[in-house]
Amino acid sequence: MTEGPHVSALDMQDVRKTYGNGETQVAALDHVTLKVGDDEMVALVGPSGSGKTTLLSIAGGLLSPTEGDVIVGPHHITDYNRRELTRFRRDMVGFVFQGANLVPFLTAKENLLLVADVAGKRGKGIDRRAERLLEELGLADRVKNTPPQLSGGERQRVAIGRALMNEPELVLFDEPTSALDSRLGEQVMELIRTEVKGRGTAAVVVTHDQRMTHYADRVVEISDGRLVA
Amino acid sequence: MKLAWRELVRRPSRFLTAGAALTLLVLLLLVLGGILDALVNSATGVLRAQTAPLIVYSADSKGSIDRSRISSEQHAGIANVPGVREATGLGVVLLAGHIEGRTEPADVAVFGYEAPNATVPAPPAPGQAYADASLQAAGLELGQTMVLGRARTPVEVVGWVSGTNYNLQGGVWVEPATWREALNANIPDAAVSPGTFQAILVTPQDGSPVADVAAAIDDRVPGVTALTIDEAIAGVPGVSDQESVFTSIIGTTFAVSGIVVALFFALLTIERVGLLGVLKAIGASSRTLAAGLTVQAVLIAAGALATGSLFALGLAQVIPDTVPLELSTSRFVFTAVGLVVTALIGSAISFRRIIRIDPASAVGGA
């Protein structure tokens, strides 16, 4: 894996992502340049189909760009192969997906430990970290509950814990409040801000809900694959 | 792996259908195999019981002991072939055995023999017999006198032996003169002269290769052919046909088991595409996910094997003695290995689909 000097948590330079060929080619991202500071929280807003998800996927090593450079922390991931990207996601990035996407038959704590299992990490330290995270997220008494036994807000909090479990450089949130009502959405955004700021972790939060953007340090708008100044 | 195990333990109902289907297939595999083993053993037990590695038939017998006749001169010639340590005679006649107090006669194979083998002791006195324990089911008891064939040749049962049946008929072991008497009295057309046997069992001297001794017998003794015991077993009428038919059915059942596993995990993988995408997104490799699926397939197969084996053992206890069924350790091992291999192959069908799941699918979903 290529490592360069650590300048910012996320540095996307002139990134394009296209699908198809010739006249049928569609640019999902068109010359996007975005930097996110080490402990910065950026809200990415835009209408459906504007390229939010593509940007998030490229930043998180889920997709490779067609053109441009992507640097996450010290990792120059543009040319990473599939295996290197898997390792990169496992060690460097935290994801919170729309609708939590927890493993339904694992307890809250086991959902956090899954990240360590995937990385082959074991031990009491890992166990304690998962418990501490759940405690911070207000889920100390829900450690042994499975997702179907949790409310929507609790599930999203477990998902946040899972994203922070591997002590990532960058946490990517994909519509974290879309399945929640306004009150719960506010609570979750407050929690996200507290957690990422408390850890000095960078975060990109994709949202279509303008009411949630004030929790971010900066709001970036995207439209038709381009960042709007 | 931990994830695969936890899913199995915490969501057993999800795997119940595949487990139940495989359990029934295991039961079928064991019963089919058990019937085949019982039929083959019942048809060839006498040959399998021999400790001698070679058996000599007359050349015109086409490998069948029923058609074979070996004269006393040929017997002496075989015994004098260099490399032969022991050459003992064996004869057989299939007769109806009338048991006292029973209206229906038992089908018996009466053997005349000269030397003990793996399961039968040295020949008893004239007029006495060792009977195969399978004849107890027909009502035969120790000390009883059984009368053989229409000529009603009497033999007294003085002991039990086991696994010595021939052509699905219970073995009755007598000394050569008693056998000749029963044969000549009941089937005059096939009568043999004193000293004649149907086959000669040959034990080579230490250090003499079996193949060399067989070739030397063929060369030096006119009108005979030496076979290994395995070749002789294959020559027993109907055995290879039975094995071929049952092996085809058993093979098909294994194939069906593989299809059950393949279809089940293919459907499960489709159902889990979302979850697998999330796991890939957080850094799980395709190899890890495929290994988890393999573990589940093998554990389901193992569970089905245990349950199916218990059902088969239970069935063996309740079915009538007249139904041939032998559940041997080797049959269980064969079925277990076959099922695990089948499960591995079946589960591997889903690997391609797992590899093709895009981790990016985890983002942007509803």
Image (cartoon, coloured by chain):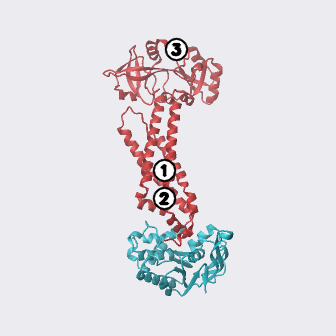
Chain colours: A cyan, B red
Three-letter amino acid code of the residue under disc 1: Val
**Mark in front: 2 vs 3:** 2
How far across and down, in percent of the image, does residue A36 sit? 59, 83
In whole angstroms, how far apart are the C-alphas of marks 3 and 1?
Answer: 60 Å
In whole angstroms, how far apart are the C-alphas of marks 2 and 3?
Answer: 71 Å
Circle 2 residue: B268
The residue drawn where x is 45% and y is 34% is: B38
In whole angstroms, how far apart are the C-alphas of marks 1 and 2?
Answer: 12 Å
Circle 1 residue: B260
Vertical placement of residue B185 versus B9, above or below: above
- Which chain letter goes with mark 2? B
How far across and down, in percent of the image, does residue B291 sit? 54, 59
The crowding category of the residue bearing disc 1, from other C-alpha atoms within 10 Å (few below 14, some 14 to 19, many at least 20), is many
The residue drawn where x is 52% and y is 27% is: B236
Q: Secondary structure at mark 3?
A: loop
Residue B195 is labelled as 3
The crowding category of the residue bearing disc 2, from other C-alpha atoms within 10 Å (few below 14, some 14 to 19, many at least 20), is some
Quadrant of res A41 = bottom right
- Which chain letter goes with mark 3? B
